[in-house]
Image (cartoon, helix red, strand yellow):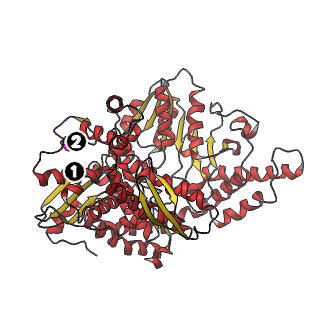
Amino acid sequence: MTAAMERIVYLDNNATTMVAPEVLDAMMPFLTDRYGNPSSIHSFGGNVGKHLDRAREQVAAFLGADQDYEIVFTGTGTESDNTAILGTISYYRDRKHIVTSRVEHPAVLSLCKKLERDGYTVTYVPVDSEGNLDMTALRESVTDDTAIVSIMYANNETGVIFPVQEIGALCRERGIPFHVDAVQAAGKIPIRVNDIGCDLLTISGHKFHAPKGIGVLYVRRGTRIRPVLYGGHQEKGRRPGTENTPGIIAIGRASQLASEHLSEYHGRVRALRDKLERDILKRFPNSHLNGNRDNRVPNTTNIGFDYIEGEAILLYLDRHGIAASSGSACSSGSLEPSHVLRAMGVPFTSAHGSIRFSLSRFVTEDDIGYVLSVLPEVVGRLLEISPFWDKEKRQGKPMPL
Amino acid sequence: MWNYTDKVKELYTNPRNVGAIDNADVVAEVGSIVCGDALKLYLKIDDKGIITDAKFETFGCGSAIASSSALTEMVKGKTIEEASKITNQDIVAFLGGLPEEKMHCSVMGHEALTLAVAKWKGESIPDELDTEGEIICRCFGVTDALIRKVIRENHLKTVEEVTNYTKAGGACGSCIPRIEDIIEEELKVAPAGESEKEKRPLTNIRRMQLVEETINNVIRPELQKDGGNIELVDIDGSVVYVALRGSCANCVASNVTLKNLVETKLREFVEEGIEVVEAK
């Protein structure tokens, strides 16, 4: 085990990712020598502004935006999500209804809960057992009182992709602002804001190999939105505060790299994910897939293990240097399993034992082989401890190794 | 990531006493797979009432596995009478502490033990485990009696604490007003400032055991991280005499260590009135 400890296999890329070496190289000068404030008149600061312009163009190209000024840099994905919703409803003050889904990220859900307390009505559109959005329910929920529709592009836990293009068309037709939380889509599947037809779209740098602390809110030209923060002129007043220049340079470079590597996600990364998933489902009779197999981002798999608990699985995997995450209640500190799995109607018995593996282009075939070699011991040991595996144990059906 | 103690990590990595005892004299099962944790405790008891073997099976997280390991280690060799005096706090002390949100794991261990003792004695199921009784939290099946017992034994004062210790109120939250009422009622029964610990002073033997356990499992591991060590020299009433060893012996901050670590931890896990004196 000591030897194994030295090896790290990082399969938690939906939580955060490694900063790509090229990204670090690009941002480093702005952490050291080129620390000037882009708003300054002197060229030491002013020249930095030219690099920000370039980064803005890179992000605009990544999202397929028409104009680079449609890109607003923020601090985090959460800030972008909050700004999109709060900024829109503070413009359309007479509309008191919001449409979102039951499986959104807390950055949207917690805000909606707060807005309900402030007098807003929120429709939480359900999903089916495979995690697909109930489009009929969504269509029926939209009214003339709806201020904004906010739906994620891909779910962080299951990877399931939502039909944002269809929702975009519906919102256009009804004249309702549409925000897409694309944090989990960025770098994994193409994002084209004009195909989606959204007014607002959120991405976060650290999910696609830029560092933490940089987010983007795409704001389509002409979209009515009021700022949430007030201060200087930065980001045309839409998000004041001195620019995070190293972060902005980084997300620009990361956007460029992400476009270049999209086909690798579609090909090699998907193949590795599928191998991991197929082998697990084949080897462990107590395992099953959570989420729609065919309509997912290519890096994510969410597997439920019956009879054993997710946090214990993670702690045991951790001993082998394997990083993953779980929808188990225990691992989050809340007492209920993940809201996403509950919305899908996954039985509590297996929701408590769900594990999410999320890959990146830095994962190798050897890494996946290593995980598959370690899992039987981890799962077998926990089944041995579990009181619910009795019947099978007594029948002398040991875990296949 | 949870801040688990080394003892907890050791016990979930290498759990003790895992499995079933086929001809167990008593088997107690608490929790359920739906709630997210469950524990099945097996005891082998000889004709003198001594627990000769204890094993467990659990569905639960790292701290549930560690708490179950601790419980089985603690009861082995004890009489049923002695074992029945073990509280969830003793399990926590054995583990060197648990994160607040994981306290319910120690309570689950204690519940299983209480149920096992009652079954062995042929007594009726204790009120707090009787799911036929009044249930406050429907999501996790937590009874009124269990909530009251845990409030009293752990001196809980807020709904959040009750949730950490019993899970009650942690899901839909609809029982929170009732939990608030129970806390209020219990606080009236035990007026502020008069804790149960003060009402029922520890026996000398119990105090010695707890002091030793806390030094071995909580304090020594902390000191060893910095190359130090500690020796228990004597216990006289509530005065504990210790000697600091290793790098602590010559450390200029040893007096700080004595007060801030040794005394604080002993007061937390053993008794409020404990005073620590360095034996020269």
Please name whichever residue, B140 or A351, is drawn nearer the observer in this view of the structure.
B140
Q: Residue furthest right?
A: A42
Task: Please identify the quadrant where the C terminus of chain B is shown.
Answer: bottom right
Where is residue A135? Give x, y as percent: 38, 39
* Residue shown at the point (45%, 65%) measured from the top left: B233
- Residue A301 appears in the rendering: no
* Quarter location, residue B138: top left
* Quarter location, residue A84: top right
Disc 2, SS: helix
Instruction: Tell me the residue that label 1 is attached to.
Output: B114
Q: Main secondary structure of the magenta part?
A: loop
* Residue shown at the point (20%, 60%) measured from the top left: B79
Please name whichever residue, B133 or A131, is drawn nearer the observer in this view of the structure.
B133
Query: Is the residue B206 above or below the residue B199 in the image?
Result: below
Where is residue B34? Give x, y as percent: 26, 49
Question: Do badges 1 and 2 share one subunit?
Answer: yes
Kind of residue at badge 1: Thr
Q: Are marks 1 and 2 in contact (CB under 8 Å)?
A: yes
- Span shown in magenta: B122-133
Where is residue A359? Give x, y as percent: 48, 63
Q: Is residue B69 magenta?
A: no
- A398 vs A131, left or right, is left
Instruction: Tell me the residue that label 2 is attached to.
Output: B128
* Residue shown at the point (58%, 63%) measured from the top left: A18
Disc 1, SS: helix
Q: Is residue B132 magenta?
A: yes
Query: Is the residue A85 above or below the residue B124 in the image?
Result: above
Please name whichever residue, A393 or B30, is drawn nearer the observer in this view of the structure.
B30
- Residue A282 appears in the rendering: yes
Q: Residues within 10 Å of mark 2 (few under 14, many from 20)?
A: many
* Residue shown at the point (40%, 36%) measured from the top left: B157
